[in-house]
Amino acid sequence: MPTKKIENSDGRLRHTARSVTLESVARLAGVAPTTVSRALNHPEKVAAKTLSRIQDAIASTGYVPNLLAGGLASSRSRLIAAIVPSIANLVYAETIQSFTRRVRESGYQVFLGETGYDPDAEEELVVTVLSRRPDAIFLTGIHHSATCRQRLLAAGIPIVETWDITPTPLDIAVGFSHSRVGHSVAAYLHDRGHRTFGVASADDPRARLRNRAFTAELAERGIDKVETSYLSPVSSLELGRRALADLLAATLTPIAVFCSSDTVAQGVLVEAQARGLASPEDVAIVGFGDQNFAAFTYPALTTVKIDRVTIGERSAEALLARLDDEPVEENVVDVGFEIIARQTA
C-alpha cells in the first residue's frame, strides 16, 4: 500500500498508509481514470487487453471501488441494511442468512446492525444507517419510536418490517400474528386438560404481545390467574431456570408453562428435572421458535414453529421488487405458524 512520510513533533519521520485511488490504478494501468471507471461498471465496453491491464492493476494495488461515490449518479449504493434485536438469537440468524443469500444473488450486500431490544438503540442505528444511503432497510418488528418512524418514512426507500404483521406497515410487512400464537397456545394447553398456567418470558415487546393474548384466551375459558415471570430481554437457559423457580414459588404443580423461546423452555425443563419434577406430568412446557435442538431435548420440546427461512426469502423478494420498480402483490405477508406437539406438552 502506498505510504507518505509525516514528520512527528520530535522531528522524526513516520509512515502512514495512503488509500489506493481510482487515479492511482489508472496510472499503473496506463489509462485514463474514466477508462478504469468504465471497466468497473461496464467491462463489456472495454477492449480485452485494456481490461486485463486494469484488472492486473486492481489486483496488485488491492483497490476497492467506492461504490457509494460511483452509485451517486444512479442513486444506488447496492447496500441493504438489516437491523435485528440480537445476533446471538438463532431464530433471527436463520432469517438473516436466507435474506442475505437472496439479495446477494441480485448484487446487493447486507449491512447488519443489532439493537439489543432497545428502541432508543434502534433509533440511533437507523439514523447512522441512513447516513450511509442504503438502498433498502430490513427491520425486525413493527414498533418503532416516533422519531425513528419519521426518519424511515422521510428516507423514501423500500422498507420491510419482519417477525410481525400489521395492516399499516411502513412499506412492507412479512411475519405472523403474535396475538394468534398466544391464543392458539392457550387453547392447545387448555384443551389438553391443564388448569394452572405460567409464563416464563424474556422481556421484549413481541413476547409480551404473545403473553397478553395467552392470558386473554385463558380468561375467556374461565382461568383468571396466570403466574408470569419476566426477566432479561435476552433469552437464555439461565433465564428459564430462574423463571420456573419464580413460578413454583408462587403456585403449585402441576403447571403448564408458555415460554418466550425454546432456549427459555430448555431452561425450564432443566430446572424441572433438577427439582425431580416430570414433564409433562408436573411441568408441561411449550416453547417458541422450533430451534434445531427442540426435537432433541429429553423429553422432546413442544413448541411453536415459525418458518424463519421463508420470512427472509419473502422479505428479500419484496425489497428486490421494490428496487426494480416492479409491483408487489402483497404488502402484508402472513407466513403463519404451527404448534409442533412433542413430549413436553
Image (cartoon, rainbow, N blue to C red):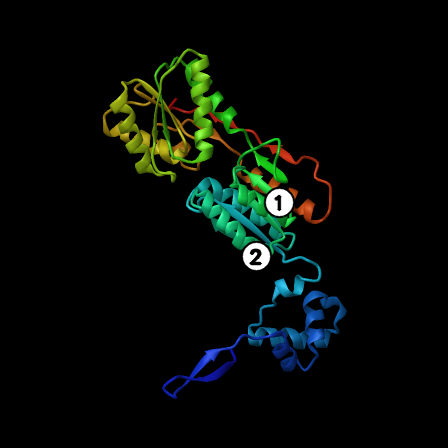
Are the residues at dot 1 and dot 2 in contact (C-beta closer than 8 Å)?
A: no
Instruction: State the mark number for residue 153.
Output: 1
Disc 1 crowd rating (10 Å Cα; few below 14, some 14-19, many 20+) is some
In the picture, the quarter occupied by the C terminus is top left
Q: Position of residue 294 (x, y in %)?
A: 41, 33
Q: Please, which residue is most extreme toward the left here?
A: 275
Q: Secondary structure at mark 1?
A: helix
Would you place residue 140 above or below residue 79 in this image? above
> Which residue is at 28% across, 33% downward?
242
Q: Please, which residue is most extreme toward the top here?
A: 222
Q: Secondary structure at mark 2?
A: helix
Q: Residue 125, can we see it?
A: yes
Q: Is residue 131 left or right of residue 212?
A: right
Would you place residue 262 above or below residue 84 in this image? above
Q: Nearer the viewer, residue 218 or 60?
A: 218
Q: Is residue 81 left or right of residue 49?
A: left
Answer with mark 1 or mark 2, whichever residue precedes in sequence: 2
> Which residue is at 54% across, 37% downward?
142
Would you place residue 129 above or below residue 202 in this image? below
Number of labels in the image equals 2
Give amino acid for label 1: Leu
Q: Position of residue 342 (x, y in %)?
A: 42, 25
Q: Is residue 271 left or right of residue 118?
A: left
Q: Which residue is mark 2?
A: 131
Disc 2 crowd rating (10 Å Cα; few below 14, some 14-19, many 20+) is few
Q: Is residue 46 left or right of residue 192?
A: right
Q: Position of residue 301 (x, y in %)?
A: 39, 28
Alpha carbon separation for disc pair 1 and 2: 14 Å
Give amino acid for label 2: Ser
Q: Quadrant of residue 134?
A: bottom right
Q: Residue 290, can we see it?
A: no
